[in-house]
Image (cartoon, rainbow, N blue to C red):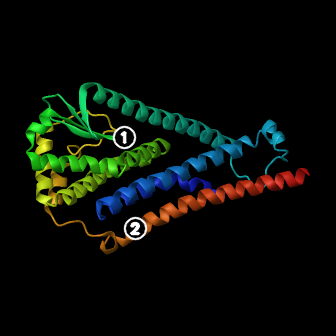
Amino acid sequence: MNVAVWLPLLLPLVAGPAARRLADALPPRAAAWLLAGSAVVLAGSSTAALVLLAGAGALRLPPIAALGDLRLPLVGDEVTVPAACAAAVLLASVAVAVVRTARRHTVITARARRAATRAGSAAGDLTVLQDADADAYALPGRPGRIVVTTGMLRALNAEEREALLAHERAHLAGRHHLFLAACALSAACHPALRTLAAPLSYALERWADESAADAVGDRRLAARAIGRAALAAGPHHRAHVALSATTGPVPRRVAALLAAAPVPLLRARAPRAIAAVLVGCLALSAACALEAAHDLHGSIEVAQGERA
């Protein structure tokens, strides 16, 4: 393998900021797909690079080489033993982080659903909690649930409640929890991708804001409902898997709703230079991982052929 195997580990440092900048110029739905998709591609490429580095080092060990009937040293293998050992340690850390993140996500979701089921009264996809504190959020699952407290219902009028529930239903319909889960797992694979979590959360809330505005047919009503709900709710330490209209930079979201509707993607004037940088990073990252895999495979075939 050559220097190509190292690039997927470095490119997230450039692609992450580019993705954030580009997302600011796109409509919410497109921004959410861009951020989540970029995180997955970069995380997959960097993890593949670690696997290849660790694998190339493992093939230097005589017992492993004997299992594959390989002749040592491998032709074209430029990976040093220290580099391979470091990659193996990082790969183990990534595996532990991914398992912990997935387990935490599953446990917190199940715990929140059990608590809502025990304490609330359900009607359709809505669960109402007898709680004076104002709160409302969407819980993923089968089926997805919208949890709202009596305090929140009292804080809003009928039209505002309709807009708030439309917002939470948009989270469930768009499967926004999967976007957050993908970003969280990607961040567990590469620390540089953690910076995409906040802009992704904002994009998902804006996506749901626009869906709510479309559902009630009034952008000002949706903005008023979100603003009043956030003022009534105040700060909440809620499970990270629960999406809520009252989270994130609410004043910025309200201002966006009071402005004109987002420009459709095909007519959006996103910064072309930033888009070119991001696309180049994603393509190069994936291509380098594939090239490194092809290179290692070729070295193994040569080694097996020489032994034969």
Compare marks 1 and 2 and give the one earlier in the sequence. Answer: 1
> Residue at label 1?
143
Q: Residues within 10 Å of mark 2 (few under 14, many from 20)?
A: some
Q: Is residue 294 left or right of residue 68?
A: left
Image quadrant holding the N terminus, namely bottom right
Q: Please, what is the three-letter code of the amino acid marked with disc 2? A: Ala
Nearer the observer, 88 or 221: 221
Residue 184 vs residue 306: left or right? left
Q: Residues within 10 Å of mark 1 (few under 14, many from 20)?
A: few
Residue at 46% across / 32% down in the picture? 103
In the displayed structure image, the side of residue 133 where residue 184 appears, left or right: right
Q: Is residue 209 above or below residue 246?
A: below
Dot 2 corresponds to which residue? 275
Residue 155 sits in quarter: top left
* Of residues 300 and 257, the one drawn nearer to the viewer in this rendering: 257
Amino acid type at circle 1 is Pro
Q: Nearer the viewer, residue 150 or 277?
A: 150
Q: Residue at x 38, y 39 (%)?
A: 141
Q: Is residue 1 visible?
A: no
CA distance separating discs 1 and 2: 37 Å
Report the residue at 19% width, 58% height from top: 213
**Residue sitting at x 16%, y 28%:** 131
Position of 217 with respect to 93 (left or right) is left
Percent from the top left, x then y, of residue 122?
A: 26, 34
For this orientation, the residue located farthest to the right is: 308
Examine the rendering and report whether any part of residue 27 can be seen: yes
On the image, which quarter does residue 106 sit in? top left
